[in-house]
Image (cartoon, rainbow, N blue to C red):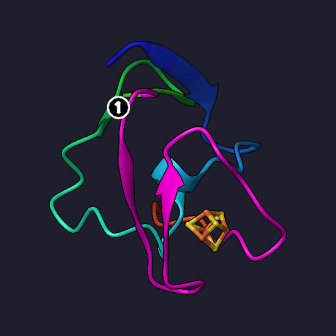
Amino acid sequence: MNASVDITTTRVCAFCKYWWDPACQYIVPHLGKTWFYNNGVKCKCIKKGVESASYHSCAMFKLKIEY
Ligand code: SF4
């Protein structure tokens, strides 16, 4: 894990429910609202049907985590 986000404001694919990482292997909680993720990987966006980098984002983002 080499990048951090504020889970309450992030819109990167790694935290989107449409990004195909069912085991959440590329994200991990850290402290409070801060989470870490791997920004060097790609997974399939099941909304768009294309590969998408973990650091990418779009207007269809939906957060996969409850906080
Ligand atoms: S491209 Fe958009 S819909 Fe697809 S995983 Fe990324 S933020 Fe979510």
Q: Is residue 37 left or right of residue 49?
A: left
Taking 5 as reference, is 66 above or below it? below
The answer to whether 45 appears left or right of 10 in the picture is: left
Q: Residues within 10 Å of mark 1 (few under 14, many from 20)?
A: few
- Whether 52 is among the magenta residues is yes
- Mark 1, residue position: 29
Residue 37 placement: quadrant:
top left
In the image, residue 11 above or below residue 47: above
Q: Choose top left, top right, bottom left or bottom right for residue 29.
A: top left
Residue 25 position, x and y percent, is 18, 45
Quadrant of residue 47 within the rendered picture: bottom right
| Residue 53 appears in view | yes
On screen, residue 38 above or below 43:
above
Secondary structure, magenta segment, majority class = loop
Residue 28 percent location from the top left of the image: 30, 33
In percent of width and height, residue 23 lies at: 15, 60
Q: Quadrant of the N terminus?
A: top left
Residue 3 coordinates in the image, percent (x, y): 50, 17
Identify the amino acid type marked 1.
Pro
Q: Is residue 67 visible?
A: no
The magenta span reads 39-62
